[in-house]
Amino acid sequence: MRLRALLVIAGLAAASLAASPACAERLIVSVSNHRVTVTPNYSGGELVLFGSVEKDDKTPPNRSNYDLVVTVAGPRADMVTRRKERKFGIWINTDSRQFIQVPGYLALFSNRPFDQIAAPEVQRRQQLGLNNVLLMQRVGPDFADVVPNDPFRSAFVRLRSEHGLYREATSAVTFLTPTLFRTGIPLPAEVPIAPTMSRSSCSVTARW
């Protein structure tokens, strides 16, 4: 059966260190394969995103210092992170935290470190890096994204990263020419496929 992996290019931005508001450059992008075939023997794969910066008539001819950030997000679902502690010689669940409609797959790639591309407030606003991605949680009767050093958030990101489902790489985007770029998008064996229902849920367990 051919199942279409729900991987969306959620954010794509190019900027120059000397960007001019008058410029109207455009990004032209595509991927090597628009459909992923998932079979019982599927063990992972890779898509290649490639494209170019299309200059306009106001772009300086020698302009080449572009920065590029690519965000790839998979289908969203409610997830639960459970905290396990060892008591009386056995591991038991002691607490949990629900994450609301977070990406099942999330990758953030750039051509250089995020802090060299944008100021901290811009990184937070544009959700550059796993520490800045919005991961909404149910905290008591409210919903909020808790700070990155929250133990539940840290455990959730760590466990997803260990399975290759959350990742960031600040040297993954390569400029082949001053305006032509590419990056590989790894798809692990556990990559989520498009759900048959509008909402789905799962859980992960961490020990600390």
Image: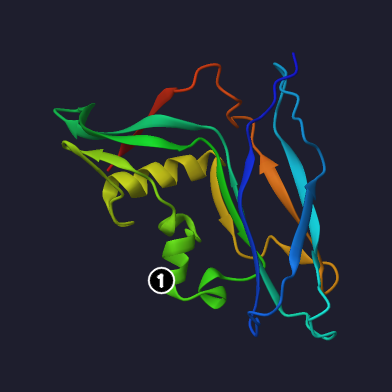
Q: Residue at x 71, y 77 (%)?
A: 23
Q: Quadrant of residue 98?
A: top left
Residue 69 visible, this orientation: no
Question: With respect to residue 180, does 70 lie above or below?
Answer: above
**Left or right: 64 as drawn, with respect to 20:** right
- Colouring mode (rainbow / by chain / secondary structure / one colour): rainbow
Q: Considering depth in this image, is 100 or 94 the residue closer to the camera?
A: 100
Q: Position of residue 18 (x, y in %)?
A: 65, 85
Question: With respect to residue 135, does 123 lie above or below?
Answer: below
- Secondary element at tag 1: helix
Q: Quadrant of residue 90?
A: top left
Q: Residues within 10 Å of mark 1 (few under 14, many from 20)?
A: few
Q: On the image, numbered disc 1 is attached to which residue?
A: 121
Q: Considering depth in this image, is 10 or 45 the residue closer to the camera?
A: 10
> In the rendered image, which quarter contains the C terminus?
top left
> Disc 1 residue type?
Glu
**Left or right: 146 as drawn, with respect to 9:** left
Q: Position of residue 83 (x, y in %)?
A: 26, 35
Q: Considering depth in this image, is 56 or 68 the residue closer to the camera?
A: 56
Q: Position of residue 41 (x, y in %)?
A: 72, 19
Number of labels in the image equals 1
Question: With respect to residue 1, does 175 lie above or below?
Answer: below
Q: Residue at x 34, y 43 (%)?
A: 136
**Left or right: 200 as drawn, with respect to 87:** right
The residue most toward the top is 1
**Left or right: 148 as drawn, with respect to 177:** left
Q: Position of residue 147 (x, y in %)?
A: 29, 56
Q: Residue at x 39, y 30 (%)?
A: 78
